[in-house]
Structures are given as C-alpha cells and as structure tokens.
Amino acid sequence: MKYFDETPHPDRLRLFLFRHGHLENSEKSVINGSTDIPLSEIGRKQMHFWKEKLSPFSFQDFISSDLSRTLEGIAILAQGRNATHRKLSGFRERSFGIWEGKTRSQIASSDPEGYALWQKVDLSFSPPEGESLSTFRSRIHTALDRFIAETGFGRNVLMVGHSGVNRVLLLRALGVPLENYFRFSQDYAALNIIDFYRAGPPVVLLLNRLPDVEEAMHG
C-alpha cells in the first residue's frame, strides 16, 4: 500500500480512518445518529475486503466508537492479529435526539425549521434532545487529543468511525471551517488516511477511498 510505512516515523501518528460498513437499515435512509444499528452482511463483506488488503501490514492500535457497527468493523480488521481494540465513547456518532429513526422527509415535514437549520449547517442548532454541531466537534476534538496524548507518536493506527466523526476529523486536519461539513462524502467502508505530527500541521493523504465494489459486495 502506497501510504504504509512498516517502521512508523517517530514524530508522526498515521491514522487509517474508516467509516463503518453498510448497515441493516441502510435502504430505509433513516437518520441513525447514536442509535445502535448493526452491520449488514454487505457491511461485513466490505470490512473483510479491507482486512485482506491490510493483512501484510502491522498496526500499533485498533480503535472505534462504542457503537456495534464500528465495534464489529474494527473486530474484523483486527482479526488474526495479536492485538486488542479499544472502544472510545468520545468517537460516537452525533446524537440527533428524537430525529433518530426518522427519514429526512419525515423530519422535513415534522420539523421544517429545524431541518432547514441542519441543512444550512447552523453550528449552534441542536435537534430536540440531540447535540449541536459545535458541541459534537468539541467532543471529537477532545477524544482525538486525549488519544494522541495517551498513545504518543510513532504509530500506525486503524480506526473505524462514523460519517460525522470522520468529517470533523478531516476538517480539523485540513484546517477548514466546520461550515464545510457537507462539502465531501464519507461513504460506507471508505478509507481516509491522515498524518498527525508532533510539530506542524496534519496532512490528509487519502480521502473517501472505496473498496472495490464487486469484490467487497460479492467476493
């Protein structure tokens, strides 16, 4: 793999950042947020595709959120390795409160004002009983800073996250304002690679790299 160094740079943490795979309710197009939804069989195949692709390489850490769709994903990626994976609640997907389990059209119909604020990326808006985007960002930044402080640099790290979590991490790495939250995709089982340095700004090496569709879905 182009971006893999068998001997990690001592002043760099290289994060191989995945979004979880396809979910059992993906075809319903509902907002899941922090609701615990398991991977579908397609999602498991997507993660196994990446497991095989990454099998020649070693990683020092395996992490995910505490939701089952990321826990199962990281368990597949860590399979057969002499390593444990850590679940970090700080990387849980954004809470959408009472919107969770509803489709976009249902939300737009029942809460048109809130839906409009969400689509405009209003940083202070919170869905009823949910999190604002600014609060969500603070939680993710705190989780990242704590993880790096605890583990240090000179490591290759595998993480399975969520679309919202990954966007926040990528925007931070790029130094781009949070208002650009919807300006790029995070598809199911996509891989991103970010370098975090002891000194100097982060560098995004790879963005939203998808598994081979036919192989991942049917292989």
Image (spheres, rainbow, N blue to C red):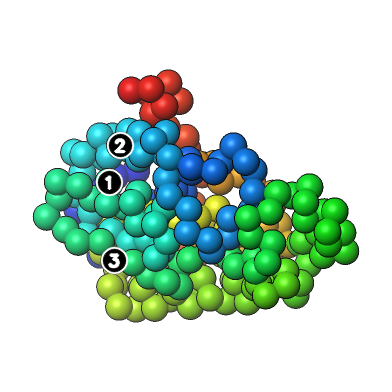
- SS class, disc 1: helix
Q: Which secondary structure, mark 3?
A: strand
Residue drawn 29% across the image and 73% down it: 152
Query: Residue sitting at 33 percent across and 51 percent down?
Result: 72
Graded by Cα atoms within 10 Å as few (under 14), some (14 to 19) or many (20 or more), the crowding at tag 1 reads some
The quadrant in which residue 87 appears is bottom left
Separation of marks 1 and 2 at Cα, in angstroms: 6 Å
Q: For the residue carrying disc 3, how many other residues have a C-alpha within 10 Å: few (<14), some (14-19), or many (20+)?
A: some
> Which quadrant holds the N terminus?
top left
In the image: residue 197, left or right of residue 37: left
Q: Tag 2's secondary structure? A: helix
The residue where tag 2 is placed is 48
Residue at 27% across, 46% down: 76
Q: Amino acid at mark 1?
A: Ile
Label 1–label 2 contact, CB within 8 A: yes
The amino acid at mark 3 is Arg
Q: First in sequence: mark 1 or mark 3?
A: 1
Question: Does residue 6 show up?
Answer: no
Q: Provide residue 188's location: percent of width, then percent of height.
A: 50, 41
Q: Amino acid at mark 2?
A: His
The foreground one among 199 and 4 is: 4
Picture quarter with the C terminus: top left
The residue carrying mark 1 is 76
How many marks overall?
A: 3
Residues under labels 1 and 3: Cα distance? Answer: 13 Å
> Label 2: few (<14), some or many (≥20) within 10 Å?
some
- Residue designated by label 3: 86
Where residue 177 sits in the image (x, y, percent)?
68, 64
113 left or right of 5 in image: right
